[in-house]
Image: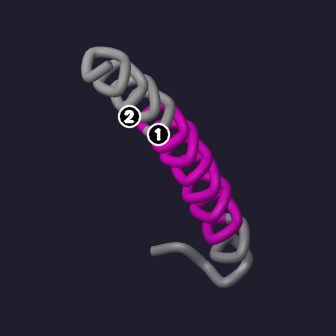
Amino acid sequence: MDDARTQPDDARAWMDDARAWMDDARAWMDDARAWMDDARTRADDTRT
């Protein structure tokens, strides 16, 4: 079992991992938005 001195370090490491995961998720969402914008543009181009 962790003692009280290592728990804050463990929490910081967990938060760092969570922030990195969120950064990855934001980047994935940005890519998805760009893909959708491209798909809309292509769809609009085929309608005209």
Circle 1 residues within 10 Å: few <14, some 14–19, many ≥20: few
On whether residue 16 falls in the magenta region, the answer is: yes
- In depth, the one of 5 and 9 nearer the eye is 9
Please report the residue visible at 73 percent of the width from the left and 77 percent of the height from the top: 5
Residue in the foreground of this view, choosing between 33 and 15: 33
Q: Is residue 30 above or below residue 18?
A: above
Main SS category, magenta section: helix
Res 19 quadrant in image: bottom right
Answer whether labels 2 and 1 touch (C-beta < 8 Å). yes
- Write down the residue under mark 1: 33
**Mark 2 surroundings: few (<14), some (14-19) or many (≥20) residues within 10 A:** few
Q: Residue at x 35, y 18 (%)?
A: 42
Percent position (x, y) of residue 8?
A: 71, 75
Q: Amino acid at mark 1?
A: Arg
Q: Amino acid at mark 2?
A: Met
Q: What is the magenta range?
A: 10-32
Where is mark 2, residue-wise? Answer: 36
Q: Residue at x 26, y 22 (%)?
A: 47
